[in-house]
Amino acid sequence: MKDRVFIEEGCNALLIDFTSIFYRYGFGMKNLITTTGQYNGAIFGTLNLILNLTKTFKFVFIVNCLDSFNNLRKVSLSSYKGNRKPMPDFLKEQILPFLEFIESLNINNILLDGYEADDLIATVATKFDPNYKTFILTCDKDLLQLFSEKSIILLLGKGGIKIIDRSSIVREMFNIHPHQIPDLFALAGDAVDNIKGVKGIGKKTAAILLEEYDTVEHIYKNLDKIEKTNKRIYLLLKDQFDLVLLNKELATTRTYLPIDTRKLISLPDRRISLSTIEKFIDRFELHSIKEKIISVFEI
């Protein structure tokens, strides 16, 4: 990350896909437990990542986006994300203390009933002051659709953070453009969100079709042409139009939610309390990052 040249102090904002990051560290650091028996891996991992990224990219504004318990996408497809197990207790017990603590660091937590963090991120990134460059922190590849000159994706995976700061990186990953991510998942499915694609159409075939026709709508407008050039693909697609359109709707982030980004930016900074930080650090035994917190947030 040190060789990147897009750090503009005073202009960078971070949008966090909270659930995906918290889950990743919660399970990846499940063995971290305090001497009093409290799990602290999700808290330590997520907080340490935020600190490292803020130190690198000089974020002046951070928004932590939460998933609503009620999910309107389930109205369209009851099996949407149906493959996910309920959140385990060892993660649940870490959430509220973490959210309360980061608020004390002037990090805004936002949630909107019925919508996912993806939609909040998409709306804020779209509506945000154009003078800001937004950085989107997530583990989910579906948010690659939000890449633009003003929105850089910080994709957390097994090897650490992959910085998506050029559309060519998305092409290297999937052979498509960022805006085609919903179309790709519409055809090939998305196991993460339990979206079933067209049987027999994988990501490679979907990418070839999208290279030629750009969107699923245009693919179906050209079915006659596909029938003449590739009968097998035609037969796989021909009766799946409704499924594909539903999949695309599910995979597409919402950018129109009633979030006033100007109000978010204008929220007054609270005075960060050293005693609050010390109590939290003592409770969850995070002594190794105490000085980093004080330094990064200039306390």
Image (cartoon, grey):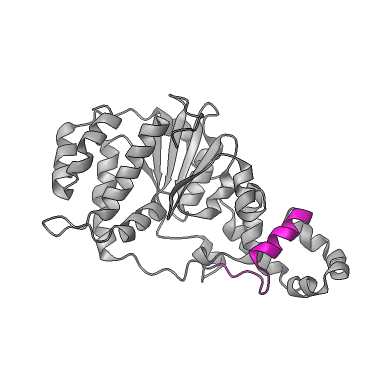
Can residue 246 be seen here? The reply is no
State left or right for residue 151 relative to residue 265. right
Q: How many marks?
A: 0
What is the x, y in percent for residue 220? Answer: 78, 63
State left or right for residue 58 relative to residue 293. right
Q: Residue at x 63, y 55 (%)?
A: 174
- Looking at this view, name the residue that lies furthest to the left: 36
What is the x, y in percent for residue 5? Answer: 51, 29
Q: Which corner quadrant holds the C terminus? A: top left
Q: Residue at x 65, y 67 (%)?
A: 202
Can residue 82 be seen here? The reply is yes
Q: Residue at x 50, y 64 (%)?
A: 192
Which quarter of the figure has residue 238? bottom right
With respect to residue 95, does 281 lie above or below?
above
Q: Which corner quadrant holds the N terminus? A: top left
What is the x, y in percent for residue 148? Answer: 60, 39
What is the x, y in percent for residue 211? Answer: 74, 54
Q: Is residue 26 magenta?
A: no
Q: Residue at x 68, y 74 (%)?
A: 200
Q: Is residue 198 magenta?
A: yes
- Looking at this view, name the residue that lies furthest to the front: 3
In the image, the segment drawn in magenta is 195-212
